[in-house]
Image (cartoon, rainbow, N blue to C red):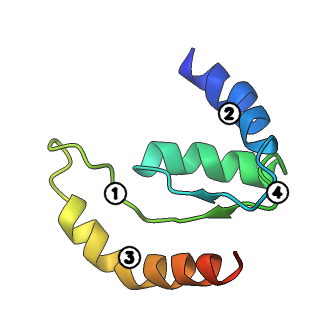
Amino acid sequence: MLAEYATEVFPEELAQINSHALIIPLGITAERIIRHLYTAKQLTGHIIVSGFPHPSGANGHRAKQFEQNKYAMTDLIRRWGEQL
C-alpha cells in the first residue's frame, strides 16, 4: 500500500503544487523512492534534499549522518529559498 502511494498518489499530489517544492525525505528508504520518482521524471521542478537521516531513535547513526550532510543540505535549502 505504501509503495502504491509513493509511486502513484504522491507524484500526483506534488504536481498540484505550482511552485518548486522542497522535498526532504526522512531516511534512506524514502530518499531512494524520491530519487526513483525524480529519475522517472515524476517530480520535475522540485528540489530534493539528500542525506537527511530518519529521526527514529532506532537510527543510531542519525546524528553522525546529519553532521556529515549538514553543510550540503544547508546550502541547497538556502539556494531554494533564494528562488522564492
Q: Which residue is mark 3?
A: 69
Which secondary structure lies at badge 2?
A: helix
Q: Position of residue 11 (x, y in %)?
A: 74, 38
Q: Which residue is mark 4?
A: 44
- Marks 1 and 2, how far apart at CA: 20 Å
Among the two numbered marks 3 and 4 on one chain, the one whose residue lies closer to the N terminus: 4
Image position of 66 with respect to 78: above or below:
above
Tag 1: amino acid:
Pro
- Marks 1 and 4, how far apart at CA: 23 Å
Image position of 18 with respect to 3: above or below:
below
Among the two numbered marks 2 and 3 on one chain, the one whose residue lies closer to the N terminus: 2
Q: Are marks 2 and 3 in contact (CB under 8 Å)?
A: no
Identify the residue at image location x=74%, y=62%: 20
Which secondary structure lies at badge 3?
A: helix
- Marks 1 and 3, how far apart at CA: 9 Å
Q: Are marks 1 and 2 in contact (CB under 8 Å)?
A: no
| Label 2 Cα neighbours within 10 Å, binned few <14 / some 14-19 / many ≥20 | some
Q: Which residue is mark 1?
A: 53
Q: Position of residue 36 (x, y in %)?
A: 69, 47
